[in-house]
Image: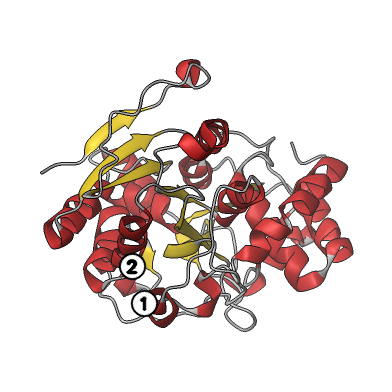
Amino acid sequence: MSPTRLAMPTSVLLAGIAFTGNALADAVNIYSARHYDSDQALYEAFTDKTGIEVNVLEGDSDQLIERIRREGAASPADVMLTVDAGRLWRAEQADIFQRIDSDVLDERLPDAMRHPEGKWFGFSQRVRAIFYDPNDIDPAHLQRYEDLADPRFEGDVCIRSSNNIYNQSLLASMIAHHGEEEAEAWAQGVVDNMARAPEGGDTDQIRGVASGECDIAVANHYYYVRLLEFDDVDDRAAAESVEILLPNQEGRGAHVNVGGAGVVADAPNRDNAIRFLEFLASDDAQRLFAAGNHEFPAVEGIELDDVLASWGDFKKDDLNISQLGEHNPDAIRIFDRVGWR
């Protein structure tokens, strides 16, 4: 049986539209801020394996947090599923999640992918990569995120707005590794090196390199893979004209963020919710993450799609993802101080 899905427009958030899902013991109700068609396969596979019906309410992460908060103990939500540790942390701060003790999750997921108190977990990995024009940039000078602030790259960098959660988490990782003062100096250096004011999404940054608007861009890795597979000839050509660099291989490793989830504090189907999270850590679900949106599995040893596999083994930052959320407020203040719009 296919999952029941319901989108939640912003305009009706506060009106409290009825959730059409089943709250019985044979169901799990998921509030999801992931908007990937491939997630449908995850839900269907869970139902096939367990017989538990999946009901899904889709919306923006902040909308879903506010909805669960307003619904309180009456919320039908069992699981909140979203992307980026910064958003998971916001849900945690709103007391959305409850602690979960699961031997399965402890065994399957690396330490870095688990909240220290078991409040949420990362199930897929997203690398914040650097892209560059090989005709204009010598990669010998561009091996680390720190190098994005090198004055030699003045006027070369395309990167998204400071409102973007991916950039907030990248800066949060810099704070965790270097402290606030050094992280602020880095952010100022990136601002000084921008080719243009921040605009657009991750795909637009890669296109900026391909078009010659800039020589260096920062984007999550899967946007690049999507471009390679687009039907549009120009998009594929844009991706093929740039090179990808996975930074900090001689140090801490490439910055990794997550697609993750937690069990809602007043989940009416708590046991089913835990079973769903444990399923997300299974080999079958991890393969679906890898195949569906070109994300890296959180569990080691899962077969990758051809493009990701072609990059070979590389080092990922093993910083616990909870720190990306903890340093999020500091990152936002730094962005404001340095004028990163």
Q: Quadrant of the C terminus?
A: top right
Q: From this view, report whether residue 81 is shown above or below residue 104.
A: above
Horizontal and vertical percent position of residue 17: 40, 20
Whether pointer 2 and pointer 1 mark residues with C-beta atoms closer than 8 Å, the reply is: yes
Front one among 145 and 257? 257
Horizontal and vertical percent position of residue 190: 75, 52
In the image, which disc is placed on residue 278? 2
Neighbour tally class for label 2: few under 14, some 14-19, many 20 plus, Cα within 10 Å: some
Front one among 37 and 226? 37
Residue 164, image quadrant: top right
Badge 1 marks a residue whose secondary structure is helix
Tell me if residue 263 can be seen. yes
Total numbered badges shown on the rendered structure:
2
- Ranked by sequence position, the earlier of labels 2 and 1 is 1
Front one among 135 and 103? 103
What type is the residue that disc 2 sits on? Glu
Residue 298, image quadrant: bottom left
Left or right: 327 as drawn, with respect to 250: right
Tell me if residue 215 can be seen. no
Q: From this view, report whether residue 42 is shown above or below residue 66.
A: below
Left or right: 130 as drawn, with respect to 244: right
For the point 39% across and 38% down, which residue is it?
Answer: 76
Q: From this view, report whether residue 197 is shown above or below residue 230.
A: above
Horizontal and vertical percent position of residue 126: 46, 60
Left or right: 109 as drawn, with respect to 287: right
For the point 67% across and 65% down, which residue is it?
Answer: 323
In the image, which disc is placed on residue 12? none
Q: From this view, report whether residue 164 is shown above or below residue 189.
A: above
What type is the residue that disc 1 sits on? Val
Q: Which residue is mark 1?
A: 104
Badge 2 marks a residue whose secondary structure is helix
Neighbour tally class for label 1: few under 14, some 14-19, many 20 plus, Cα within 10 Å: some
